[in-house]
Amino acid sequence: MNKEIFNEGHIVFDKEATSREAAFRKIAAAAFEKGFVASAEDYYQGLVAREQEATTGFKDGIAIPHCKNKTVFKPGVFLMKFEQPIEWNALDKKPIHAAFALTIPEEGATDHLKLLSLIARKLIDDDFRNGILNETDPAKLTEIMNQISY
Amino acid sequence: MTKNIVAVTACAAGIAHTYMAAESLERAGKAKDYNIKVETNGAIGAENVLTHEDIEQADLVIIAADIKIDLIRFTGKPVYVTKSIPAIEDAAGLIEKAFTEAQVFGKKGSKVGKIQIGNDKEKVGFFTHIMSGISYMVPMVIAAGLILTIANLYAFQKDDLGRIVNWGFDTSDSMGLLMSRLFAVGQVGFKLMIPLFAGFVANSIADKPAIAPAMIGAYIANDAELLGAKAGGGFIAAIAVAFIVGYLVKGLKKIKWPRILAPIVPIMIIPFIATLIISLLVFYVIGQPIAAGMDGMYNGLTWLNDNYSSAPIIIGVIVGGMIGFDLGGPVNKTALIFGTAIFTDTLAKNGIQGANFVPQTATQAAISVAPLGVWLATILFKKKFSKDEKVAATAAFGMGMVGVTEGAIPFVAADPVRMIIASVSGSAVAGGLAAATGCKFFGGIGSPLGTFIGYIEQPVPFITWILCVLSGVLVTALIIGFTRKPMMLAIEEEVAVENE
């Protein structure tokens, strides 16, 4: 994993969000705070619009919200751990406990986008999902994320 | 026997579902002992691309995509088309379902689309790269060309005898100063359009890191002073630079750079290396032949002029054809310089009665043929041109009418071989006829209008000159029209739509 795309500072433990929209707000705020998007509102709108096309809720409580948007400066991933289960209309209809939120610029940064695509692939791996769901220590979570490489 | 499956996955953003679907299909396929290969059409381009053999040997094709995928390469194969999510949700179930429900693609009567996959740059090749560059260049050609046209019209002045032969701006007059500035604006645009074009052709081949080296390389290749030549390399040199840079950068991207360098490779290392290499190539490999070639052509023309002065049509055809060859590039410039030089030399030596008008008259007759020919082709063969091309052709008409050859560049760059043949033929006809009929071009606009805005001695006043030029224009238009396939720009528009 590349530190610019993901580091310990990209892990957010959220206690408040109870809805998908609230979760999107939290994600947008984090992405804005770390300087990945020009506008939290635009990125939030992008996430909502993408979600309307098809759900990003995967299975076993993990979602991968994302959008490709002009407001995004650079590719990044934020790991959101939600204390309260969030109804997401996931593929298995189970509520979401963790989300990988991706910031995807409209063009360029091929090498970094490749890393984001590897995260998507990794979600299919049961061990990876379990590790992300069960681990609560930021350092350990970062370690799991750092296994992703090409 | 183990069954072979090929699949293509794609999604709107090209980052998440494309790869989740691919991973799911690969895992499910392997678990069931199928040979499965999955091509991902994501934001970073097509990866693990299916080869002709892969498809040939496949027993089943699965398309799990949320965007349109061109199925033409799967013609004759059982194809099952679905979205990305069913593959992510239950890939094993999807494979079984696909085996029973797939339909052979391309059966008689079924429709075959021709939509390009947006990110799949490999397959589109030369034509798409050039088109991409042109789409960025056209607005600049039009903006600069029209401003230049306005200024150019103003620049022609009457001499003491009332003949419109003087060209220039009286900058002590405020209107003259304004027009001279507008002329400079147009020239800046024409100067910039060559690197702009090269930059975006290279961008189409190898993305952002290729833009800077291609722009710098093309600028040098088009700058006479930097090259030490009589003229820059024009758009043909720009195409050469763009493709060299594009594939050079592509190669540089494949190098396994040390991890620590990775973040600065695309913004620093590749542009730096590629700019250095292309600049040196332009100076030492491209620039010298241009300069030497122009000298050679110039000497050839001088020899021809010395030995064949009794047959002006030969000179006329040759210099006319040269004007139409590269539209402002070295061949064109050599002919122009030659025409002016012969005229001023013989004028100084022999006076106006003994001056040799032939090369100058032929070049001026030819100068508007390419842009006007393109325009006429879009009028005569409406169905073979897209909406964008017709707009560009209208601008080419404006530029052609005031003798600005560059108006045809977008069309010629898009389809060099066919268009150069058309343009050279028409230009040679115009140059040859003007020379054969004994027209004498004293000064003015090198277009049909030149007979009004300018001073041309000719057998039948006004008519001869106009007919000479229009014959050339018609020849160019007819060659374009009859050799061209319909709607060249159509593909570009589709790609643009896909990319949105």
Image (cartoon, coloured by chain):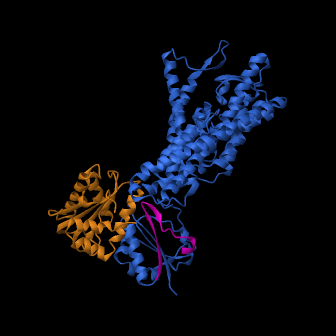
Q: Is B37 covered by the magenta stretch? A: yes
Q: Residue at x 36, y 73 (%)?
A: B88
**Residue B71, can we see it?**
yes
The extreme top residue here reads B160
The extreme left residue here reads A16
- Quarter placement of the C terminus of chain B: bottom left
Q: Which residue is drawn at 45% across and 84% down?
A: B33
Horizontal side of B263 relative to B6 (left or right) equals left
Q: How many labels does the image show?
A: 0
**Residue B369, can we see it?**
no
Q: In which quarter of the image is residue B476?
A: top right
Horizontal side of B194 relative to B457 (left or right) equals left
> Is B170 or B40 nearer to us in this picture?
B40
Residue B100 in percent (x, y) is at: 46, 83
Horizontal side of A10 relative to B4 (left or right) equals left
Q: Which colour is chain A painted?
A: orange
Q: Which colour is chain B painted?
A: blue
Residue B47 in percent (x, y) is at: 47, 66
Residue A41 in percent (x, y) is at: 25, 52
Residue A47 in percent (x, y) is at: 29, 59
> Is B396 or A114 nearer to us in this picture?
A114
Q: In this view, does B46 lie above or below B375?
A: below
Q: Is B366 covered by the magenta stretch? A: no
The extreme bottom residue here reads B1
Q: Residue at x 50, y 38 (%)?
A: B140
> Is B373 or A136 nearer to us in this picture?
A136
Q: Is residue B14 above or below residue B226?
A: below
Q: What stretch is highlighted in magenta?
A: B34-54
